Amino acid sequence: MASMLHEATIYVLGRSATRFASQRMKLESIYPGCNIVFIEVEISLLGEVDAACERIVGAERKVDYFYMSPGLIPLNGPEYTKEGLEICFALSYYTRMRLVSNLLPLLSQSQHPRVLSVLNGGKEKAIYDNDIGLAKNWSPIAVINHTTTMTTLSSSTSQKTTSKSPSCMHSPAGSKRTSLPG
Ligand SMILES: NC(=O)c1ccc[n+]([C@@H]2O[C@H](COP(=O)([O-])OP(=O)(O)OC[C@H]3O[C@@H](n4cnc5c(N)ncnc54)[C@H](OP(=O)(O)O)[C@@H]3O)[C@@H](O)[C@H]2O)c1
């Protein structure tokens, strides 16, 4: 994607600028002169997500492309952030929806706004309507089913409520290109 951009500013949100350094070098070699702004943020915390978005909203007039893939395979049982959200749920759903909603004003200034969310393998399934946050019914499969279905429902709702909506692509992670033979 970096090779297709011209005079773009790329914001990267992550937990460690030091860990991002090698990726930054790769991007700069593909796209010399690109303006990469790394914002150090604990992405599982909505307060930090809001602060990062405020920086972007304060500095930019529009957002054309928005890509997100934070996530954790739910293997360790439920774990909670200091804001009280289950962490897999926070990364796969709450953080992503908050990012989209905070950046929607800038996305709607773009001629062709696009949002790509790399989330779970699989498709939407039935969810526990009376236990949306899985306080009583947490399991790895339930987290995957809830965050997948809720992402689709929220994306459809935001498409109906905004006058100019970004194209929303919810892509199963199986289509991701990796170095693994397959
Ligand atoms: N790769 C697969 O085979 C596969 C299969 C099924 C589903 N998925 C899902 O597809 C998405 C992308 O996959 P991926 O392999 O690119 O994921 P990944 O590299 O394991 O993780 C993506 C990002 O999530 C953030 N993250 C992970 N644990 C975190 C934590 N405890 N607190 C805050 N941030 C955390 C990390 O951000 P930092 O940059 O801050 O470290 C990381 O860059 C994820 O949602 C993953 O669950 C992947």
Image: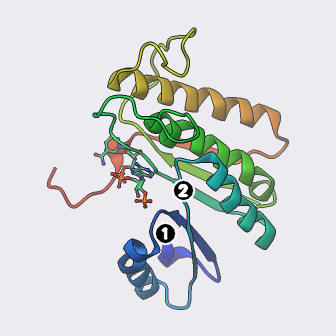
The residue under the point 49% across, 84% down is 31
Disc 2 target residue: 67
Q: Is residue 83 left or right of residue 87?
A: right
Q: Is mark 1 within 8 Å of ligand 1?
A: no
Graded by Cα atoms within 10 Å as few (under 14), some (14 to 19) or many (20 or more), the crowding at tag 1 reads few
- Whether tag 1 and tag 2 are in contact, CB under 8 A, the answer is yes
Whether residue 146 is visible here, answered yes or no, is yes
Q: Is mark 2 within 8 Å of ligand 1?
A: no
Label 1: element kind: loop
Quick one: label 1 or label 2, which is nearer the N terminus? 1
Q: Residue furthest bottom?
A: 33
Point out residue 122 in the picture as x, y percentages from the top left corner. 37, 30
Label 2: element kind: strand
Whether residue 61 is visible here, answered yes or no, is no
Point out residue 87 in the picture as x, y percentages from the top left corner. 46, 38
Q: Nearer the viewer, mark 1 or mark 2?
A: 2
The residue under the point 49% across, 18% down is 135
Residue 1, disc: 1
The residue under the point 81% across, 46% down is 164
Compared to 154, does 66 lie above or below?
A: below
Point out residue 12 in the picture as x, y percentages from the top left corner. 54, 68
Amino acid, disc 1: Met
Compared to 82, does 26 lie above or below?
A: below
Compared to 69, does 52 lie above or below?
A: below
Amino acid, disc 2: Tyr
The residue under the point 61% across, 81% down is 6
Q: Residue furthest top?
A: 130
